[in-house]
Amino acid sequence: MLAKHIRAFSMLGFSLALAGCIHYEHQSAEGKPADQVAVIQQFDKHLTITRIDNNGTLFWLGRQNEYRLGAGTHTLQATWSIGEGRTAPLATTVSLVGGRTYGLYGEASKGRWSYDIRDVETGQSATVKAPSN
């Protein structure tokens, strides 16, 4: 009987985890101390990071509101949710500092959209500008 209760509780917990907000930990952050891991918090509900360094983020499992990455340079791809659909992914390269928290901010205007990753304390963008030719 105890086994049935444990199983039911486990299934309930698993279901709630899938239905609620979850975090994503990139392989670059696995096993590292907090001062070597940067956190990106999702502040715009329309945006979803779908890929980090060509690795999928399992965004289809549930609403992700936090992404943990190892310090350094990463390429992110994000989509903008429009009703039931999503836009094509938009890529950007960011340089993240370990121990810092960043925000994922988006902006849409006249049918176009963009996003930025900014330090939540300083407001400084983490986006790495592409070199001009």
Image (cartoon, rainbow, N blue to C red):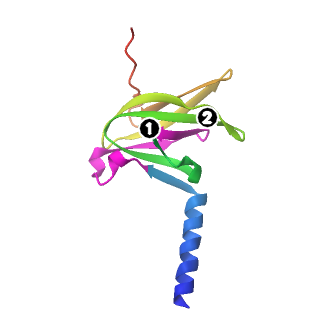
Residue at the location (39% across, 30% down)? 94
- Residue annotated with mark 1: 54
Query: Residue 3 in the image: x percent, y percent?
Result: 52, 86
Asked if residue 8 lies left or right of residue 126, the reply is right
Residue lying furthest bottom in this view?
Answer: 1
Q: Nearer the viewer, residue 103 or 68?
A: 68
Establish if 70 lies above or below 114: below
Query: Residue 11 in the image: x percent, y percent?
Result: 57, 72
Badge 2 amino acid = Trp
Badge 1 amino acid = Asn
Residue lying furthest right in this view?
Answer: 83
- Residue annotated with mark 2: 80
Segment colored magenta: 25-52
Query: Residue 80 in the image: x percent, y percent?
Result: 61, 34
Q: Which quarter of the figure is the N terminus placed in?
A: bottom right
Residue lying furthest top in this view?
Answer: 133
Confirm whether residue 81 shows in the render: yes
